[in-house]
Amino acid sequence: MSASGKIQSCRARSVAFLMLVATSIAVAASPGDQLRLDPKDIAALSKGNAGAGTSGVAGIQTTILFGDPAAPGPYTIALRVPAHTTIAAHTHRDNRSAVVVSGTWWFGYGSVNTKDKLKALAPGSFYTEPGDQAHFARTEDQPAVVYITGVGPTDTHYLDASADPRRP
């Protein structure tokens, strides 16, 4: 497949995923939940560092785009992850799906965050976080932005409690 064919295929998959997310949200949302956010609107939303379904790693900013990850129902969060950030192996109770918006997001499945299990996901990439299945991630020389969608309430459990950045 040519480079332009690969780009078109990637764009088609991204559009199909976004349509699936929008349809899922539209089915679960009431008419009062109509929402259109452009990048400027998203930038104006409040940002937090940790919350339901987030890693709690210092420096990662979380923005709730839709819903409430701590409550029953659909939600979408945006993660802004600085360069040189590592997230240890962890799970979430809900099935989640995600799209890489910018940067390169290194993502893997399993109980230990090792480089050989990571796959570089460029902007437009899609991946899943199956409920109760361990996964991990990192960034290298550039930050990344990832949009994650699930059905709450969600949570985060680290496989190794000593790797949990939220511990006292």
Image (tube, grey):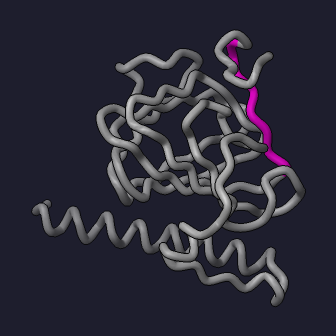
Residue 33 position, x and y percent, is 78, 82
Q: How many marks?
A: 0
Q: Residue furthest left?
A: 2
In front of the other: 76 or 60: 60
Q: Is residue 126 above or below residue 9?
A: above
Q: Is residue 30 left or right of residue 55?
A: right
In front of the other: 155 or 129: 155
**Within the image, what quadrant is residue 37 found in?**
bottom right
Residue at horizontal 38 percent and vertical 60 percent from the top: 124
**Within the image, what quadrant is residue 162 found in?**
top right
Residue at horizontal 73 percent and vertical 85 percent from the top: 34
Q: Which quadrant would the N terminus be assigned to in this image? A: bottom left
Residue at horizontal 69 percent and vertical 31 percent from the top: 91
Q: Residue furthest bottom?
A: 31
Residue 159 position, x and y percent, is 69, 17
Q: Is residue 54 above or below residue 103?
A: above
Residue 141 position, x and y percent, is 29, 34
Q: Is residue 83 above or below residue 168?
A: below
**Within the image, what quadrant is residue 114 found in?**
top left
Residue 52 position, x and y percent, is 78, 44
Q: Find the magenta span and give its range.
A: 153-160
Q: For residue 159: magenta?
A: yes
Q: Is residue 143 above or below residue 152?
A: above
Q: Which quadrant would the C terminus be assigned to in this image? A: top right
Q: For residue 72: magenta?
A: no
Magenta segment's dominant SS is: loop
Residue at horizontal 46 percent and vertical 52 percent from the top: 145
